[in-house]
Amino acid sequence: MRYLSSRGKAPAIDFSEALLGGLAPDGGLYVPESWPVLPDGSFESYAELAAAVMAPFVAPVIDQADFSVMVADSYAAFSHPDVCPLVELEPGHYLLELFHGPTLAFKDVALQLVGHLFDYELRRRDERVTIVGATSGDTGSAAMEAVRDSDRVDMVILFPAGRTSEVQRRQMTTLGSPTVHAVAIDGTFDDCQDLVKAMFADEDFRARSRLSAVNSINWARVMAQIVYYVWAVRQLDRQEVRTTFSVPTGNFGNVFAGHVARRMGLPIERFFVASNTNDILTRLIETSEMVAEAVVPTLSPSMDIQISSNLERLLFELLDGNGPATAELIGGFREHGHVRLTPAQHERLVAEFGGDRLTDAETLEVMADVHASTGMVIDPHTAVGVGATRRLRRPDETVVTLATAHPAKFPAAVEQAIGIRPELPEHLADLFDRDEVVTPLPNDLGTVEDFVDSVRRA
Ligand SMILES: *Cc1c(COP(=O)(O)O)cnc(C)c1O
């Protein structure tokens, strides 16, 4: 399998280069040059299915037997035997629980595997890297957990001091790994992101510390997320009926993975793109226009995003794989803050994607109603997906809503909705008793670079 840039001006590369490189040199996102078909047959476990679904994407550079071992190790870190169990919420409406990984959000499904893939590839090349990243919450801890035991990767994650939830902060500061470092920046999430961008723009620093990233545009993350769509449809065992998926959406990575599963032949009817008040994608679906607005903080912070980076991969397809046209569309959006699809492009978009948005008040209402009617406790991100399903679903449509976070990850919102504080699962039960290790730093590039230089092995 070769990978092309969505902007059409970078050479085609193999999987390992897409894995380690992240963004293409022309600023585009890597997409596979063709869509493989899904494997036939039955599989004993999630990990076996996963290895088979992903095999064509990593060939020929990753050895298949080695890959199967990495996949098995990645999903052995999950606390549920099904890895991603499917549960019925109400007749014809299911939840796919993606939060049984080490850090309680669906990011683990992809990042656990990416951690193993990085180690494997770096060992093969006899190289080391320093991964830097900024997080407003979920991604940081999932990435840190994924490379905590790596002998090839050092990691420095910046988060805005005092602006993450206590659970999120403690998941980053109590790992006890000497090679992953949590840094509390005196500033906002945007300040953290700007510092990371500035480190990548500093050529000398970038080269000497062998800087790398595992952000949501990395193809390997999308690839790992294809699997649970296939898993869910197989669990439903109703493959004569087409299934619809409702996806709580931020960067569009998760829902794009579902789109790929559909392209690979999975019988998916359509997707509900579920947003909170930050509803740029819902507005795009409703109006054919994408207009940037300021980000508003909500109860579902992992979806508080203004520009969904992975959307570029879908636009590339809507433009029939025309890289320069995709570059122009994205460039126009970056420059003017708005862009409009042609009627034909918009028609193709709405044939596959519906969209809806929930306010915080509506999100709390869904959480309360689900608890009252089923006894189940859901987190605010999942509630946005459930709310969208309840509004958009046709009678008789089978819908799977992706449950993207464990309720205990967002205890304040859950308590506000149902008056009960959810308990942390067993492997994190002592989270609040663990010692925290965190380095507070000012919002200053030189100071942050000095810190990275002082801790990295690369
Ligand atoms: C990251 C995240 C999302 C958004 O996923 P995207 O792939 O960015 O669309 C939704 N819910 C939770 C809990 C998340 O952590």
Image: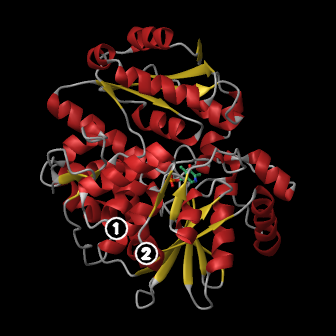
Residue 275: give x, y in percent of width and height: 62, 60
Q: Look at the picture and state if 228 lies above or below 307.
A: below
Residue located at (70% from left, 36% from top) = 165
Q: Look at the picture and state if 412 lies above or below 385.
A: above
> Which mark is nearer the camera, 1 or 2?
2
Q: How is the image coloured?
A: secondary structure
Q: Residue furthest right?
A: 419
Report the front residue among 71 and 397. Answer: 397
Give SS at disc 2. Answer: helix
Asked if the residue at label 2 sits under 8 Å from ligand 1, the reply is no
Q: Amino acid at mark 2?
A: Pro
Per the model, the C-alpha gap separating discs 1 and 2 is 11 Å
Residue 71: give x, y in percent of width and height: 32, 52
Tell me the quadrant of the picture where the N terminus can be found: bottom left
Mark 2 highlights which residue? 343
Residue 378 can be seen in this image: yes
Upstream in sequence: badge 1 or badge 2: 1
Report the front residue among 325 and 92. Answer: 325
Q: Amino acid at mark 1?
A: Leu
Q: Residues within 10 Å of mark 2 (few under 14, many from 20)?
A: few
Q: Look at the picture and state if 53 lies above or below 414.
A: below
Mark 1 highlights which residue? 318
Q: Quadrant of residue 259?
A: bottom left
Q: Quadrant of residue 315?
A: bottom left
Residue 425: give x, y in percent of width and height: 65, 48
Residue 46 can be seen in this image: no
Badge number at residue 260: none
Residue 432: give x, y in percent of width and height: 71, 31
Give SS at disc 1. Answer: helix
Q: Quadrant of residue 433?
A: top right
Q: Look at the picture and state if 269 lies above or below 26.
A: below
Asked if marks 1 and 2 touch (Cβ < 8 Å), the reply is no
